[in-house]
Structures are given as structure tokens and as C-alpha cells.
Image: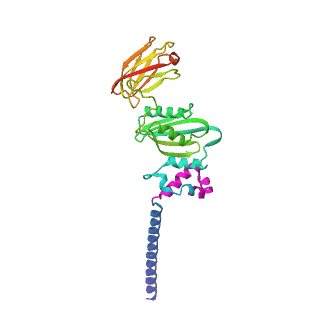
């Protein structure tokens, strides 16, 4: 009888212990879940801003200059446009205060990727012109992709320093573009997300009744013809012009080509309704029109 009582007591004790362990495990699991939930709380504006700063200058530089950075970025809201970080202002502030270093110890290859939801042909032309105007003439297309998220164009170039994001932003602004975000994956890998919804080529716009003369031509001439109906082109008497003129819409889709395999001094042609740009060149070589052309636009549309 005594043995049975002892066994019953031991059994009850083991059950109580098991329940206690189970409850303890449950409590620990609940505590862990609460901690994880707390860890997943959205970052504050300041934390997001700090993360973006670190992405540009690195953690070591950030820690070394923490106090100085906090002084320059103390007005957190001023570095936001609505709910998004004004990344160009962040870069500009870092540059102005000597915190962002764009120079390499020696010339080396680096990559730039440009992303847009606009038309690929137009975007590549626009970016190519932009790069040329800030001094980059030699680069190689590494990759291009076009999917549901938009179009990406990756190029590789060699230089002593990384392209200045502030200078690039200023040049893009002259073409109606805005840099939405910049991601520095490494010192030699930069990614730009660009809004081209209001973009246009940075070319002269012909106006009805106003002549435009170019005395020297070294490259094919692009012109904006959005508001005129027809154009008369006069070639300099010293030229040997064999016209080659391409008409494009606003997305740079080719609409028509006008070409003549005979020397021409005057050429007048009408524009299709959807024509936005024309590219004027020579059928054989640009040197045939090196002494210049005069454009006389007429009509309005």
C-alpha cells in the first residue's frame, strides 16, 4: 500500500513538472515572438537616413565621424521629400562636408546602372547625351534588361573618380529628369533610379518664322520640331550635301527617313503629325556638311 502511494505521488509530481516545463516553453515562445515583433518595427526616419548615409560612406567612416554627421543631418525632415529620402540632398551634404570620397587611388573600371520606366530607345539616347555633356565619351554597355519593373542599362567605364551624383543630377534636370534614388553597392558599383516622365532631349527647338543657322557641323544635328509643320534646309555653297534626315516621335521611334543620293543645296519637307525630333546628317559622311546648314521652319501644329 505504501509503495502504491509513493508511485502515485511520483506520477503526480512528474505530471506537474511536465506541465510546468510546457508552460515555461510557451512563455519563452511568447516572449521570443514579442521580441521578434519588436525587432520588426518600422525604422524611424532618422534610422533610415543613417542607413542611407552609411551606404554612401561605409560604417567605419560613419562611426569615425558620427558626431559631425549628426550635426550636419540634425534636421532630419529637411532630407525628406514627403515620405522619401531626398537622396541627392544627402549626397550633396556629404560632399560639401568632405565626407563622400569619389576619387580612386588610380584609374580603374567601375559600373553605373540606370533604371527607368520610360521608353528604352529614348532613355539610352538621353543618358548617352547626358554622359557626354559631363565629359564621358568612352564607355561600354555591359548589360540591358527590359521587364515589368522597367528598363535597366548598365555601362562600364574607366576613370580616376566616380561620376559626381550632384553633377549628374544637374545635367539630367536640364532634360526634365529627376533622380529618385541612388544605391552605392560598392565603390565601383552605383545604381541610379531616374524619373523620365517629363523628359525631353536637350536640343534646340525650331520655331515657326525663326531661322536657325549652324556655321560648323561636326556631328549629325538633332532638332526639336514639335510645334512646326515644315522645314526648309539650305546647305552652305561650299558643302556637298547628300541629305539623310530621320524623323522620330517623342519616344524616338523612327517614323520616316528622307534621303537623296544627289548633291542638294535646298530641301523642303513636311513633318508627320507625330514628329517630335529630326536628325539631320549626310548619306555618306558628315564632312559633306561641315560648313553648316540653315533651317527655316514654317507653319504651326
Quarter of the figure with the N terminus: bottom left
Hey, which quadrant is residue 268 in on the image? Answer: top left
Residue nearest the observer in this picture, 22 or 301: 301
| Residue, far bottom | 2
Residue shown at 46%/69% (left/top)? 31
Residue nearest the observer in this picture, 246 or 121: 246
Indicate the position of residue 48 as horizontal and vertical percent values. Answer: 49, 55
Q: Is residue 49 magenta?
A: yes
Rendered position, 164 above or below 50? above
Q: Is residue 95 magenta?
A: no
Residue shown at 56%/36% (left/top)? 156
Question: Which contiguous range is marked in magenta?
Answer: 42-70
Rendered position, 285 above or below 3? above
Hey, which quadrant is residue 29 in on the image? Answer: bottom left
| Residue, far right | 105
Could you tell whether 163 is left or right of 246 in the image?
right
- Coloring scheme used: rainbow
Indicate the position of residue 142 as horizontal and vertical percent values. Answer: 53, 35
Indicate the position of residue 95 as horizontal and vertical percent values. Answer: 58, 47
Rendered position, 57 above or below 158? below
Rendered position, 150 above or below 217? below
Hey, which quadrant is residue 104 in on the image? Answer: top right
Could you tell whether 134 is left or right of 200 in the image?
right
Quarter of the figure with the C terminus: top left
Amino acid at each position: 500500500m505504501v509503495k502504491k502511494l509513493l508511485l502515485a505521488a511520483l506520477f503526480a509530481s512528474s505530471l506537474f513538472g511536465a506541465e510546468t516545463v510546457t508552460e515555461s516553453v510557451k512563455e519563452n515562445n511568447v516572449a521570443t515572438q514579442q521580441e521578434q515583433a519588436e525587432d520588426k518595427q518600422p525604422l524611424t526616419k532618422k534610422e533610415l537616413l543613417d542607413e542611407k548615409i552609411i551606404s554612401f560612406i561605409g560604417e567605419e567612416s560613419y562611426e569615425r565621424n558620427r558626431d559631425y554627421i549628426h550635426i550636419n543631418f540634425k534636421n532630419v525632415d529637411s532630407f525628406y521629400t514627403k515620405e522619401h529620402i531626398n537622396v541627392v540632398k544627402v549626397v550633396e551634404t556629404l560632399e560639401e562636408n568632405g565626407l563622400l570620397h569619389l576619387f580612386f587611388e588610380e584609374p580603374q573600371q567601375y559600373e553605373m546602372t540606370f533604371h527607368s520606366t520610360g521608353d528604352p530607345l529614348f532613355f539610352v539616347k538621353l543618358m548617352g547625351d547626358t554622359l557626354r555633356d559631363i565629359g564621358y565619351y568612352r564607355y561600354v554597355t555591359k548589360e540591358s534588361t527590359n521587364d515589368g519593373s522597367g528598363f535597366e542599362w548598365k555601362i562600364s567605364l574607366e576613370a580616376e573618380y566616380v561620376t559626381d551624383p550632384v553633377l549628374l543630377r544637374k545635367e539630367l534636370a536640364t532634360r526634365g529628369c529627376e533622380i529618385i534614388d541612388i544605391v552605392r553597392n560598392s565603390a565601383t558599383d552605383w545604381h541610379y533610379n531616374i524619373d523620365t516622365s517629363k523628359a525631353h532631349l536637350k536640343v534646340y527647338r525650331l520655331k515657326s518664322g525663326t531661322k536657325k543657322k549652324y556655321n560648323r557641323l561636326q556631328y549629325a544635328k538633332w532638332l526639336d520640331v514639335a510645334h512646326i509643320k515644315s522645314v526648309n534646309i539650305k546647305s552652305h555653297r561650299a558643302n556637298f550635301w547628300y541629305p539623310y534626315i530621320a524623323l522620330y516621335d517623342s519616344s524616338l521611334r523612327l517614323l520616316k527617313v528622307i534621303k537623296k543620293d544627289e548633291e542638294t543645296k535646298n530641301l523642303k519637307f513636311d513633318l508627320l503629325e507625330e514628329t517630335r525630333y529630326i536628325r539631320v546628317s549626310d548619306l555618306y559622311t558628315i564632312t559633306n556638311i561641315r560648313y553648316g546648314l540653315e533651317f527655316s521652319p514654317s507653319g504651326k501644329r
